[in-house]
Image: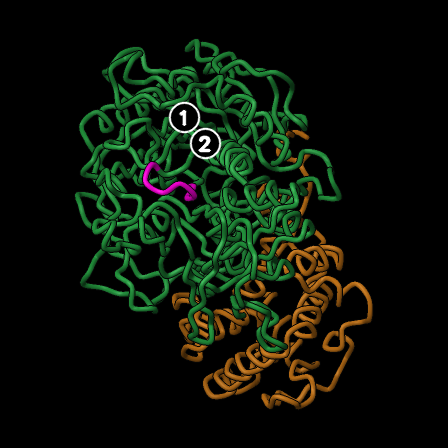
Chain colours: A orange, B green
Amino acid sequence: MELTRRDALAVLVAAGAGSLAGCAAPRASDGDAGTGDAGDAGPVPVGDSEMETLVAVAEVVYPSAVDGVPKFVRTYTGGRVDADDAYARGVAAAVGSLDEYAEEFHGDRYAALSESTRREALDYMSVDVVDPVPDGTAAQRVRHYVVNELLYAFYTSPTGAGLAGLENPPGHPGGTESYREGPGR
Amino acid sequence: MSDGPADESAAAPDRTPSPRADVCVVGAGPAGSLVAARLSRAEYDVVVLDAGPRFDPDERSDRMERHLRPGLDEPIWGMGGERDAYSSSGGRSYPLNAARVKGVGGSTLHWQGMVMRLHEQDFELDSSVGLGADWPLDYEDLRPYYAAAERELNVSGASDNPFAPPRERPHPLPAFPPSYSDSLFAEACETLEIATHSVPNARNSEPVDGQSACVGYGTCDPVCPSGAKYDATRHVERAEANGARVLDRVPVQRLEHDGAGDRVTAAVYATPDGEEHRQTAREFVVAAGGVETPRLLLLSASEAYPDGLANSSGVVGRYFMDHLFAGVGGTLDEPTRQKHVGFNTTESHQFYDRPDDSRTAIKLEFLNYAGPAPADVALGADVFGDALLERVRDAYGNRVAMGALVEQLPRAENRVRLDPSRTDDHGNPVPDVVWSLDDRTRRTLERANEIQRAVLTEMGADVKWTVGPENTGPAYHHMGTTRMGTDPKTSVVSPRLRTHDLSNLTLAGSSVFVTGGAMNPTLTIAALALKAADHVSERL
């Protein structure tokens, strides 16, 4: 199952960030250096390094049969962070926490770990069981800004939710035809 | 995100009183905004005062995401805190702040959008089956106003309901066709001889008046990002286009009257800067909902009206009613295609009219949104990857459910009163919602469950849950607290919606309902508001 840029844009439009994603190329998805700078007026805090980590997490939390994850994540996250600086800082800080954890306990930044180790890292950090809290502990912030952000994008997209049989999920303006169609549409 | 108006950081809007208002309307929900639009179109000078903010329509997508994502706990429409403090007593807890929105548009900002006319029997319940009380008007009196209200709300519907009262013309827009899951219910209902029919919806099935058709966001309750679902901001905009002033964040503290106690002279309101102002007018219309309308009257007690303004009957706040939810849900061995839209397309009113005094009204609903959506499961899961997808597939896909609204009859002990032990952000006693269930309502809930279980069993469903007498909750329809009647000793307003006690004070909204039936109340609220506007206009 191929995730497309269109899937990402559909979620962005629903989230109110679509106007940015639809015109000028999103800055953060355009290969900015990214500094992780959490300052109010600093450079875009979500750059290539942060994007690599997000893609690495997505490859763990998304189903294995899904293709096109890097482009989907970059398009979606780029649109979101370009539209909301405070949100971008939250994402960057949470990614930083995850990378710090990975380096401390697994000896390398998160994106450099093997897929099985990346999966373990989320479990060991308790990201699988904590509540998502934007200003909570490191694990709670990773759950909110990283894992749930990626899961929200995926399972409110037509392709992601479609894997479970719902091609027009809540949050997606997929029209008023699909609800009338049977499973063999 | 702030729920305050976007203009607060710029120049503060003018919240000073209008110098020569013909009409002062308290509340910018559906009743108040319809009154304001109607009277301003007739070129009366109208000012509307609302306690809450003017919400930015561009923020609706953010509100939707807050609804869809756990961890974003800020209330969708800003309800809560000292401004909205309340008490709940009686046999049942009442979650008041989940049940309403304060602000321009009122509770239509988070409503489901179902709009049915009451049945003829609803207006003559006592005389027909010995239940509750009769309204002082009948269906024919309200019928032209129902037709007008359906036009105002651009109702999408069909004339296929064999139980509905007579109507004069088709609905303004065609009904939404039945869902796939409706077809699964239909076979079982046919076997059980339960007639089903379409649902009138206050959401656009086609583009109209520059508004979008429904695009299927599926989050109708609590927010419609497309604006295809009716909300009262449409009539606020029309009123403003007609020249009406609509002031937000100006909670009315009390109403003042003349020396004789015959006429209201001013609405005293507070502004965000802490100042108080007096809005004078020739006519006053209070349209603040089934809780705040009686509360404002009680807060306006005076020497002439020691028990509360317009309360010489002593019934202001009494006869509080809501509808009760009954539901049964389960799973089928096949896909049911839920959650594509956030509204229902099939109902049955077969069990609505009461055969005798053994039970109250039941309105059956066939849900299009049973069970969780994939994101609901995923965002709270403790597994990821393929295991998560498997869990999502297990939770989504084969759910099926029926709901019902059940009528609660008016009882004097259910009431809204002031709680002198607690005050709001302006030092006013908060409302205390005293609410309980009686045995007849419980029996009706059981009957609704019985019908629902029969349908699901006939479908071959594995029943997983039931909401009945023990775990029911309110449908958030506040009614009955300033009841209509012809006798000033037992009612608050006349059939012309004017208070018996004060000659220029009109009450619009569900607070004037004598009984509540089991229909979602907003179409009747709208019809009564249009009627009230006509009567106010006659006096101006």
Residue B506 lies, with reference to residue A124, above or below; the image says above
- Does the magenta run of residues contain B504? yes
Q: Is residue A74 left or right of residue B423?
A: right
Q: Is residue B248 left or right of residue B238?
A: left
At 69% from the left and 81% from the top, the residue drawn is A47
Assess disc 2: are there few (<14), some (14-19) or many (≥20) residues with their C-alpha within 10 Å of its C-alpha: many
Q: Residue B111 versus residue B256: which sits nearer the camera?
A: B256
Quickly name the residue at label 2: B400
The x, y position of residue B130, in whole percent, is 24, 15
Q: Is residue B368 among the parts visible in the rendering?
A: no
Helix, strand or loop under label 2: strand
Q: Is residue B92 left or right of residue B257?
A: left
At 26% from the left and 61% from the top, the residue drawn is B429
Q: Residue B475 versus residue B240: which sits nearer the camera?
A: B240
Tell which subunit mark 2 falls on. Answer: B
Identify residue type, mark 2.
Val
- Does the magenta run of residues contain B44? no
Quickly name the residue at label 1: B461
Q: Which residues are magenta?
A: B500-506
Per the model, the C-alpha gap separating discs 2 and 1 is 8 Å
* Quadrant housing the C terminus of chain A: top right
Q: Residue B241 versus residue B67: which sits nearer the camera?
A: B241
Residue B520 lies, with reference to residue B225, above or below; the image says above
Identify residue type, mark 1.
Ala
At 42% from the left and 19% from the top, the residue drawn is B138
